[in-house]
Structures are given as C-alpha cells and as structure tokens.
Amino acid sequence: MNDATRMIGAGRKIVAEPMAVNAPIVRTSTVLYPDLATMRDHRGRRETGERLFTYGARGTPTAFALEDALCELEQGDRAFLYPSGLAALGALFLAYTEPGDHVAIIDSVYPPVRGLLQSHFNKRGVTCTYFAPDVQSFQEALQLNTRLALVESPGSNTFEVIDLPAFSSIAKARGILLAVDNTWAAGHFYKPLCLGADISLQAITKYVGGYSDLMMGAIVTNEAYYRPLFDFAGAFGICVSPDDCYTGLRGLKSLCARLDVHGRHAIELATWLSGREEVGAVFHPAIESNAGHEFWKRDFTGSSGLFSFALNDGLAGKTDAFVDALELFGIGSSWGGFESLALPVDLKARTGTWRGPSKLIRLHAGQEKSDDLIADLGRAFSSVA
Ligand SMILES: *Cc1c(COP(=O)(O)O)cnc(C)c1O
C-alpha cells in the first residue's frame, strides 16, 4: 500500500472500538492506577524498554499514536519525539556518543549541527570530521573510534544525493551507526531504514506539520538500536505536548497530497529557471546534472518543494536584490509549509568540499499556482537586470 493510504488510519489503534476517527488529545501529568501492584508492574515493564503510559513525561496516548504513525511512515520499530528538529539532532549525539568517540558528519548537513558540535560536544570529548558527500570521502573520514555517522540526502542547500546503501555497507562492516536526516523527503519519498540506515530523523516542523505552526522533531529506529534514545528521554524528561502531537497526526493525513503539489511546483520552477540566461546553475535532485541524480532516481519515489539555484557570474552580486524583489516568496527560514519562501544561502561555512558557486538562492515551492510563482521570479529577474 502507498503511504497516502496507510497514513489515513495510522496511529488509530491507540483507542478501543467503537473509535473516533482521530486520536484523542490526552492532557495529563498523573496517570492513575487501580492498585499498587499494577503500578509496580507497569513501572517494572517500562524498565525493560516497553512503551507504557505511566506518566505525562513518558508519553501520552496522543504521542504514542503519532509515534506509531511515524514508524509506519519510516518503516521502523520505535519513534521518539522532541520539541524541534534540532533537539532531535542533539538527542542523537547525546544518546549515542560518549567522551572519546568520534562522529563523521556529511559536509552538506543542516548548518546548525556544526554549532551544536562545536559548542556542546567537542569540549566534552566528542570529536568530529566533516566529509564531502561521496563514498570515498566518507571512508577517509572514518577513524578507529568512529561511533556514529550522520548524513543528509539530499544535502541542505546544495542537494547532493548519496549512495546510501554503499554508505551503509561501509558503516556496518565497521560497527558504526548510520543516521540519516530525512527532512527533505519527509519520510515519504525516501525510506532510509529500508536502504540500510539504522536511524532516520526528521524535522516534523517542516512537511509533516505542513502549516508552519508546529515545532517538533522525530527519530525513528529499529528494535536493535532504540534503547539509548529511550533511556535518554527518560533521564532528561524529554516530552512533547499532546496538542502538538495531534497537530502532527493531522499533518500526516494530508502529507502525501501536499507533497505531490510541492514536488510538482518545484520541478516546474526548477525547469523554468534552468532555461533562463540569468541563471548559472540549478540544484535539484531530479535534474540530471545534479550531484547524485542517479541515486535519487534509484532510491527516491519523488521530490519535495525545496531546491536552490545560482545567478550567473554577471549577476553574482545581485542575490540579495533578487530575493528582495520577490513578492509572492516570503523571506524567512524553515520551510515545508503551504507558502513559498526564498532565502539567500552563503556557503562560506562549508569546510572546503563544495566546488560550486558560494552564493545560492534557496526556494521553497509552496501551494500557490506555479504560473503565479514563475511570473514573480520573472519580475525579480527584470528588476535586477
Ligand atoms: C529545519 C531542519 C532541521 C531542524 O528542524 P527545527 O524543527 O527547525 O529545529 C533539521 N534538519 C533539517 C534538514 C532541516 O531542514
């Protein structure tokens, strides 16, 4: 069955029949037990890693419904929820690394990860190496104490796609956990856990939320590797509100339908931009010239709404002016909502593996009619010409 079909009933088995079509919002801190023996039994079973409704901070039925739905989407066994996508990335490093460990991180990673490692992990004895998005660079980055590798495919801002099964064989042979940031494909167009990754995470904030009104992150993993995340969430009291979980579940119902539109619009914009003389290059996984296009064709079932392009050399200084000239594209970070967005991207921070132009314009194609979006881009070209 397609995700679009599976997401309709996903998470519903949390309630008994006859059931509401939506999961209930269960707001609580205290969970009441009929007697002490039951309470002790539940607490004991939780020690063994069983997911049970024992306290608000340990997860509510609403959270469990969203976790179940995300496991179905990502084809994993256990899901964990966090207050944001970045918090999920922080949890990944906290749960799976110890002082003395090394982590290998793809150079096209979501940029705030660099700051996170620098400010909170390096000084606690976790070292890291950034590598270019190809198999050979990955192999060269690995050390004897490499514990975890974090990749993103396609990469943030530059959209290189990697040969994930090849990365997975290398990681498995050396006992290294392989985590994939799956935010771009929203768990729908790409199934990292089916391609050999151990951990798939995404910013629910983006496409699952879908309306720019939710902050949340999620990690999905399988039975073999979930325990460090389970223990971390328990020790730190990590939880998300049932209302936010309900919003995430609602987003899942229309995720695939929305992604179809975002994906179509982005391809229409990228194709139109490719034919413009003002444009130097377009970075979109579905475009043949894109780095790793062959892996996108093999491993993905579609593309979402985010891509980037560079103005030609003659207009290189006009990136900011172009973005300011747009009327339908909002200026702002985050993406995955209904609205189109544009943002200048400066690639100075990349550690030297990026060979393309240093200034790009990142576009998120929203739900507006693509003819209107193309007309807006045309107006912006005229204004910077
Ligand atoms: C936005 C984003 C995140 C972080 O999500 P927040 O919910 O905004 O913290 C992580 N990874 C990728 C690839 C993202 O685009």
Image (cartoon, rainbow, N blue to C red):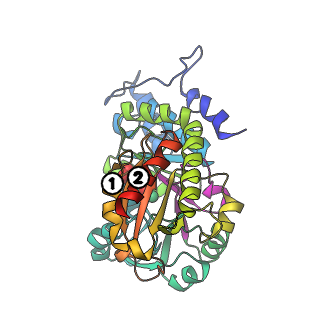
Q: Secondary structure at mark 1?
A: helix
Whether residue 200 is visible: yes
For the point 33% across and 72% down, which residue is it? 317
Q: Secondary structure at mark 2?
A: helix
Instruction: Answer above or below: position of 105 versus 15.
Output: below
Report the front residue among 148 and 30.
148
Picture quarter with the C terminus: bottom left
Ligand 1 placement by image quarter:
bottom left
Report if the CB atoms under discs 2 and 1 are less than 8 Å apart: yes
Instruction: Estimate the x, y position of residue 313 in percent, counting from the top left.
Output: 43, 76
User: Which residue is disc 2 drawn over?
Assistant: 379
Q: Residues within 10 Å of mark 1 (few under 14, many from 20)?
A: some
Q: Which residues are magenta?
A: 177-202
Whether residue 358 is visible: no
User: Which residue is disc 1 drawn over?
Assistant: 325
The amino acid pointed to by label 1 is Ala
Instruction: Estimate the x, y position of residue 237 in percent, counting from the top left.
Output: 32, 46
Picture quarter with the N terminus: top right
Mark 2 C-beta closer than 8 Å to ligand 1 = no
Report the front residue among 280 and 155.
280
